[in-house]
Structure formats: structure tokens, C-alpha cells
Image: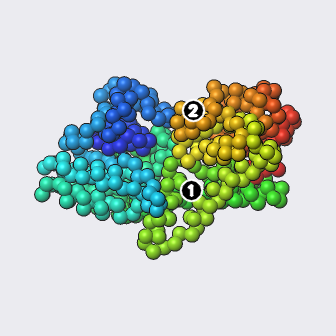
Amino acid sequence: MPSLNLAIIGTGHVGLVTGTCFAEKGHRVICVDSDTSKIETLRQGGMPIYEPGLEELVRRNVAAGRLSFSTEIAPAVRVSEIIFICVGTPPTPTGQPDLSFVEAVSREIARNLDDSYRLIVEKSTVPVRTGEHVRRTLEKYAAKGVAFDVASNPEFLSEGTAVRDTLTPDRIVIGASSKRAEEKLRSLFETFNSPIIVTDINSAELIKHASNSFLAMKVSFINAVAAICEECGANVEEVARGMGMDKRIGRAFLRAGAGYGGFCFPKDVEAFVAVAESLGYQFDLLRQVQEVNVAQRERIVRKIDKELWVCKDKTVGLLGLSFKPDTDDVRESPALFIASTLIGKGARVRAYDPKAIDKARKAMPELTCCADAYEAAKGADCVVLMTEWEEFRRLDLDRLRTVMAHPTLIDCRNVFEPASVRALGFTYRSVGRP
């Protein structure tokens, strides 16, 4: 397979991982971002995000000359055959995604197209029919007679496993408007050894929003079941195991806990609801998914309230700040919601996370950040485990109990076995388990 020249516009989580993995497959990739500090960090060998395995891949492909970084779109467009748009689409107050970055990048790409054919690919998560707007923008601002196609290639990576998800995806979705575009993307993904699904662009755009919304629905469903289990003495893990063995359902995402967080699920569910409403459909099912997710965080606060009675002047140790393990992303993190609520009630919150401390400190300066789990638990009236990092699974619980003022442990991710923890002298509460 001949190597291709690729431009990745936007070096957030998706753009940086995508570009690096394409370079790892032997293609020549330029990653472009308007954030000069981020680009300088990457040029100096640093990493703006934590993602397992990514730093090594970036260094290897930079050293091999296949991966480079720039703040300028124009030269990247001129030397590239395929241009991926990977810029952010943050939510607006209405829930609709802000597509101003997509529009601005489309204009800039259009102004730098020349006589050579280019394929412009949406990689950002966008509402259905965005491809039509991208095409019209390119036609409006490009020189007459320029040859190009627009395609959609949604990403399905998960933070914490993004490199693996990109190099060995469950499926590759190509939304193509022409045979030429389809063949170009097929050649790009030739060595990925994954099923390729080719659709129209609108369907490809919908696949992404529908997939994330369905996964969020599974999370909210099992958390709702966990609430029922707590009222009747059932065990949500046994319920989930029994459900998950049905191949029509599957075990993935049926883990009771603190609810979903991060940037993608909250944003994508809200966007899908807003898009549906703009098309005349009231997506009440997904509205309930959102409500259950918020309610799950509030249930955790009530668990803490029940154990402390009065939160004011109590010390709470918080273990985990990222919204999930193996990432430093604290956006929409349930842990920060819990921390903010407890601080608002007058509690002293001491927190620790293996990777997300710096980002959490920026997001919540009033948080007391600690060097390890035992420092966070020192003098605590209660410890709340919010993120299931492997490091926390290996905690010395005897030591943890010794440094606490009162041995109360609230396990919001069901990491520990209840009887074993209680045998050590803890007051122990988890989610959906007796």
C-alpha cells in the first residue's frame, strides 16, 4: 500500500490519536492546531493529554519523519491528499453543537485548494447534514473548477483505550458522496483489518450520535436498576451478569457506578436530542437518560450525607478525579460534581488522582489536591472512591483505615468486595449491592 499525505486539522484527543495512528501505519501526517502552546509542546516532545501508549507512538513517528506539527493550515492543505477535520464541536446553550470551528476550517481549506483533487473528511462529531454545509462552504470559497469530495469518517475511540480503538476498530464507517471518495478512504484503511461499512454521509453522521447515545442509555439503565436493587436487597452485579450473558444485550456498559461523564457522552446525547427536535422529533427517551445520569450523582451525595449526617466541617477523601480511569480528562467528571457539592455543604475535600491532578486543580482551585491516596484519606471522616484506577484496586486497606479519622468507605465504582472490606472494620457502601 503506498503511503498517503494526510492533514489532521485539530489536535485534540481525536485529532492527535488519529494522526499518530495513521503515521504508525506508514502515512505522512501533518497535525495542525491554532493553539500555539499545544503545538510547541508537541514539537518539544511533550504531551498535552494523557493517553496510554500515545506518547511512545508520537515520539517514534516524529523520529521516523512521518509525523509533524504545525499551526498553519495552508501549507498542510497544499501537500495533503486527504484532509481530516477534527476540531471541537462544543455544546451551545440550546444543546446544538457549535459548528463555528468546522465552518472556519472549511473556509480556510477551501481557500487553499489548487488543481489537485482533495478529499475533505469530517472526523469531528457533528449533527446530521453537516456534510452538506461543509460541501457548500467549500464550493463557495474555493476557486472555480477545483476538484474535491466531502466524506464522513466518524471516530469511535474511547479515552483510555484510544490508540487500540483507532488501530484495531470494531468497524470503520465511511460516509461517501462519490465512488472516488470511497476508494480513496478504502485505500487509506486497507491495512487496518477491520470491517468497513460504506453509507451516505447523513447516515454516517447519525451512526456516531446514535452509537454514543445508546451506550449512555445502557449506563443510565443499569444505574436505574441499581437504585431498585438498593431498595429491595438485590445485587446489581448479579443482575448485570445475568443480563449480559444474553448476546442480544451484552455486558459492556452495564456497570453501575457514578454515571457517565467526560466530554463526549454528555455533549453527544444533548446534541442528538437537539438535532432530533430540530427535525420535529421529541427524543424523550434520551431526555430520561440525561435525568437518570444527573440523579445518580445526587444519589451518591445522599449516601455521603447519610453517613456523615452533617457535612459541614467534616473531611472527605476523594479518590479519583478523572471521569474514568486511564485518562486525565476531568470534563463533566462525576467526581468534580461530588467535590463541588460537598464543598458547598461546608466539607473539606482532600483529593487524589494518578493523572488528573493538574487538570482538576485548574478546574476547581478550591480543591485540596494530595500526593497519594493515603494523604487524601488522612484524618478523613469518609473516603469516596470515584474512579476505578488500577492503583486503587491495590490499596492497602488496613493502612487506609489507620490514617482515617473514621473508617467509612463509599465505593462508587464497586471496586471492592463488600464482606472483605467490612471484615477490616470499615463502614462500607457501594452501588446497587447489599
Camera-nearest label, 1 or 2: 2
Spatial CA span between label 1 and label 2: 27 Å
Asked where in the image residue 16 lies, by quadrant, the reply is top left
Residue occupying image coordinates x 57% and y 39%: 364
Q: Is 269 positioned to the left or the right of 410 in the image? A: left
Display colour scheme:
rainbow
Three-letter code, disc 2: Ile
Give the camera-side residue of 335 and 422. 335
Give the camera-side residue of 257 and 160. 257
Q: Is residue 172 visible?
A: no
Give the camera-side residue of 335 and 431. 335
Q: Residues within 10 Å of mark 2 (few under 14, many from 20)?
A: many
Q: Are marks 1 and 2 in contact (CB under 8 Å)?
A: no
Q: Is 410 positioned to the left or the right of 334 in the image? A: right
Residue occupying image coordinates x 35% and y 29%: 40
Q: Is residue 24 above or below residue 109?
A: above
Residue of label 2: 357
Q: Is residue 378 above or below residue 236?
A: above
Point out residue 234 in the picture as x, y percentages from the top left corner: 81, 56
Residue of label 1: 215
Give the quarter of the figure containing the N terminus. Answer: top left
Give the camera-side residue of 7 and 12. 12
Q: Residues within 10 Å of mark 1 (few under 14, many from 20)?
A: some
Q: Secondary structure at mark 2?
A: helix
Of labels 1 and 2, earlier in sequence is 1
Residue occupying image coordinates x 44% and y 28%: 56
Three-letter code, disc 1: Leu
Q: Secondary structure at mark 1?
A: helix
Asked where in the image residue 401 lies, by quadrant, the reply is top right
Point out residue 321 in the picture as x, y percentages from the top left corner: 61, 39
Point out residue 388 in the picture as x, y percentages from the top left corner: 65, 39
Q: Is residue 210 above or below residue 120?
A: below
